[in-house]
Amino acid sequence: MAAVIVVHGGAWAIPEELSKASVDGVKAAAREGFSVLKRGGNALDAVESAVRAMEDNNMFNAGHGAALNSEGEVELDAIIMDGRTLASGAVSSVKNIANPVSLARAVMEKTDHVMLTSRGANMFAESIGVVTVPTDALVTEYERNEWEKHKNYITGVMEDFNTKWAHDTVGAVAVDCTGNVACATSTGGIRNKMVGRVGDSPVIGAGGYADNFSGAVSCTGHGESILKVTLARHILSYMEQGKTAAEASELALQHMGVRVRGAGGAIVVSPSGQWAATFTTERMAWAAVEDSVLWYGLDPNEKLQEQLSQ
Ligand code: GLY
């Protein structure tokens, strides 16, 4: 069967000046992940590699370029999940780690646990020789300036989160040529979040989920809303009831809007290669590769395509 990868760079009101770099970034990440699949790599390797590409890209709120908390510090969350075995690994509130998605994978593969947080996650990273970086190395000038501008924002004033607050988690889902699915999600969370706040991204069933019996999902958007409706699992339960990937994500995102007034987005792939990229925010940069065609978009209902060279 044909392998497919879908990536997102976060659902939010992406300003015009960031739109080209956001789209270029998701296209590059989708190409990167697809090259892994094309070389015979599995879905897990592909989603890790696509998310690493976006963590390394200053444009996105993950790894380098992450949003800063109320003390002006980086605290990163990530998850990865293997749909074949339901194995999952996650980290939350980590500092000094440039690629939290790979640390999440190490939690999955080298510990008996599903999530490590904060100091414990950093201690684990050190014990397995993950290279740390100075925290400031992950902070961009753009983010420092935005943080200075918005630092009086306080948690709880989320009425119009959708249009006002920068929020661009990254994620990837893939199905490989053997029909195995995987997901990965990584984020710096909400700018000016309380110290120690953990959003949906590293929480299994909320920020991501993967199961070969239904599909793989990576979510983005207002973390507290996504947590309340367990968005990733909610989408997959619609698929288990026979909805398509697009129908399932639309229904679950609508439910989140109505039930908790939350906005966001999701990318989905099924074990048969059906996929969707859906959002209820103003914009979401996304890209997908299927049958050597690169699909991408930013605005609602936008679906552009390019042929990839063989
Ligand atoms: N969706 C990412 C977060 O709220 O932290």
Image (cartoon, rainbow, N blue to C red):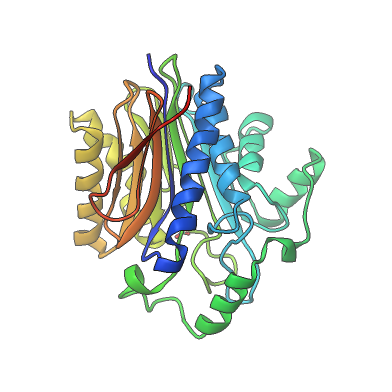
| 238 in relation to 86, above or below | below
Residue 64 position in % (x across, y down) = 64, 57
Is residue 184 in view? Answer: no
Residue 293 position in % (x across, y down) = 37, 30
Say which residue appears at 25% left-offset and 54% top-offset: 300
| 122 in relation to 236, above or below | below
Say which residue appears at 44% left-offset and 14% top-offset: 178
Residue 273 position in % (x across, y down) = 33, 24
Is residue 146 in view? Answer: yes
**In the shown orientation, is residue 219 left or right of residue 114?**
left
Residue 288 position in % (x across, y down) = 39, 36
**In the shown orientation, is residue 113 left or right of residue 292?**
right
**In the shown orientation, is residue 2 left or right of residue 182?**
left
Figure quarter occupied by ligand 1: bottom left
Say which residue appears at 46% left-offset and 81% top-offset: 154
In the picture, the quarter occupied by the N terminus is top left
Residue 174 lies in what quarter of the image?
Answer: top left
Q: How many marks?
A: 0
Task: Out of 25 and 197, give the one closest to the viewer.
Answer: 25
Say which residue appears at 51% left-offset and 49% top-offset: 25
